[in-house]
Structures are given as C-alpha cells and as structure tokens.
Image (cartoon, rainbow, N blue to C red):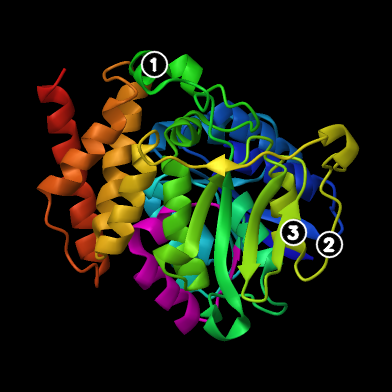
Amino acid sequence: MQAVTLLGATGSIGVSTLDVLARHPDKYQVYALTANRSVDTLFAQCRQFEPEVAVMLDEPSAERLAKQLKMAGIQTQVLAGTQALEQVAESDKTDYVVAAIVGAAGLLPTLAAARAGKHILLANKEALVMSGGLFMHEVEANGATLLPVDSEHNAIWQCLPVGNTQKHHYDGKGVRKIILTASGGPFRDYDLAALEHVTPEQAVAHPNWSMGQKISVDSATMMNKGLEVIEAHWLFGLQSNQIEVILHRQSIIHSMVDYVDGSVLAQMGNPDMRTPIANALAWPNRIDSGVVPLDLVAASRLDFSVADHTFFPCLALAYQALDAGGTNTAILNAANEVAVDAFLHSQIKFTDIARTIEHVLSTMTASDGSTLQQVLADDEQSRQIAAEFIKSNK
C-alpha cells in the first residue's frame, strides 16, 4: 500500500488523480490533500478519502474546512500556509507526492519532496521552468524518483529506452530528437489579426482537453508548449534544437521520439490525463485508468502541421529564454502568470500577453540562477515589471 500526498487536489489534475486512486483502494491510500481556497471541494474529497492531513493556503479557509470536517465527524487534521505544504510533501508518512499545484506556488513544496527523496509525480511545470538545474540536483542528490505526468513528457518517457527513470543524457542511446505535439488551442484556425479581439471565454474553451483557466489560456497562446520545451530540456538532458514542436489537432499522439536509425516511436491514446497519471503511479507496471480505449478507426485520421512562431510568439519567447539560460525562464514564467491573470480579468488583450512577456525579458538582466534566492528574487522582479507595464499601457 502506497501513501500519496496530492499537492493541488481540487484542480483538474488533482481530480483526475483521485479518480484513478479511487479505482485502486488496495494499492493506494491518501495521506494528505492540499488546496488553495476551494474549501467545499476539498471537504468533499476529505469525506471520500479521509486523509490524515489537509492543507489550505490561508487560515480563514483552513478554519472553515476544519469546522466542516468536525461537524461531519472526520478526523483529518487541517493545516494552513506554504510551510504546511512543504511539511506534507516531505513527511515520512508519504511515499508518493503528486505535484499538481499550478504556477510558481508549487515550486517550494515540490523542492521539499525532492530533498526528502520522494517518488514525485510531476505535473507542476514551474519546478523545472523556474529552477531546473537546482531541482534536478536535489532529485539526483537525494535519490528521489521523478516521473512526468504532463501528457507530452509522459509520452516521451514511455518512448525512451527502457529502464530510464530519471533525467539522462541520451547521446549514447540513439535519440536524434523529441517531438512534442500540440493541439494548437482554440484559435489555431484564426487569422493573425483576429487574435486582437478574442475573449477570455473563447480562450478557455479548449477543443480537446478539460483544463483549468490558466493552463487553457497558456494552451491558446502556446506558452504551455513553450514551458514544456523548457521542462523537456531538464527532464531528458536535450538541447533546444533537439526539441521540436508540431501541431496535431486531434491530440491522439501525445509526443514522439525520433531515433538516429529512422525509427519514430509515438505514444497514443485518447486525450485524458488519467492515462499519464495511472502510468506514473503504477510504474513499472500498468493499472486501469478508467480511460475509454482508443478507437483508431473512429479517429479516422491524424493531421500534423508546423507550429508557426509568428502566430504563436509565446512559443518563440520560451525557446529564446531557454537558450539565454540563467533565470530567464523563471522571468518568462512569472511575466506570463501576471499577463494571463490580467487577460482573464479583461485588463489586457490576448495579444498583449506576448507583448508583456517580451517587454519583461528585454528589460530585466537575468542572474545565473545558482541559488533559490536568485530565482525567487528574479521571479518577484519580473512580476513587478509586468504589472507596471500592464498598468502603463491600459
């Protein structure tokens, strides 16, 4: 029986993870569930899974949850704050840590899990985007196991040479490049000029996947894919010119590995996050995920096209930040978070997201990112510059 801590239980990844766990009560038990401020949702999850610990971001939310649990006769201990997130991530009582907190907020608890040598199921891109070198050092130095849950990285991991559970340099393994597939989001068939007028409601309506608002906007701008390029660099030890992004509107092939002998291995399946979650949970075995089997005849066709960096400038900016090195990727990520939030609140246009990020990258001087303090300082400065740029250009 494996004990699981789920960081970000009420988001789309968290809900999918709990669905998989519920199918295998003989294999997994939930030690801790965490959430931002979704008290009612976390209460329902606690009632179903009865974790030992639940964590809310702030004290008022924690007090509300504790009161509801007490009235329901549920013995779950309720904690609050970022230190509590780190506490449950590094606890001796947990074996697996599912890192599913969206954004920079997931960095510190995921680092804590790495330092504690946990079996980490990584769905939080920012741990690698913000501090890839530092994070991978902690994973390797402390004997943690790192398994990717992002559908693209999980697909790559499944297609790489057998037996690789950590980051490796694949130069001697015959890998020429990896190919990350992208649906292209809801605006893939728009004219470039039309992007100036799209709304938040349109941006969050993803054609294939069911995701949260922030990641849905990132998919529409292709920043999500840009962050995945950065993540792939750290996970698989490949340079940016060995990581290609192509559009694949059906989201049936989740990514591919191109080998020097001409072989291309692809991982396929219906677009459902429960597949990579179940794969990472059960590795090296396989368990039922609840996902409907893929019907290739019904799917009928698979289409591919170039990911145009002019149409998707956020993707180009991500490659630029990766090649520049240091904390440029942390700066990119922070500016994007501020810009996406402003767009979702109708403060800027969709196309202003890329403009904001480009301004911040060109304004700031990145540090080498050799310490966590540098990463967090540049993250904060990036947010300030992005907010000032948005305010001055309303």
Over which residues does the magenta segment extend?
Answer: 122-147
Mark 1–mark 2 contact, CB under 8 Å?
no
Per the image, label 1 sits on a secondary structure element best described as helix
* Residue type indicated by callout 3: Asn
Mark 2–mark 3 contact, CB under 8 Å?
yes
Gap between marks 1 and 2, in whole Å?
45 Å
Gap between marks 3 and 1, in whole Å?
39 Å
Gap between marks 2 and 3, in whole Å?
6 Å
Q: Select label 3 or label 1 by which is in front.
A: 1
Q: Which residue is mark 3?
A: 279
Side of 215 where 193 appears, left or right: left
Q: Which residue is mark 1?
A: 194
Q: Examine the rendering and report whether any part of residue 189 can be seen.
A: yes
Q: Nearer the viewer, residue 170 or 357?
A: 170
The stretch drawn in magenta includes residue 209: no
**Percent coordinates x, y for residue 108 in the rendering:** 39, 58
**Percent coordinates x, y for residue 89 in the rendering:** 52, 61
Q: Which residue is mark 2?
A: 286
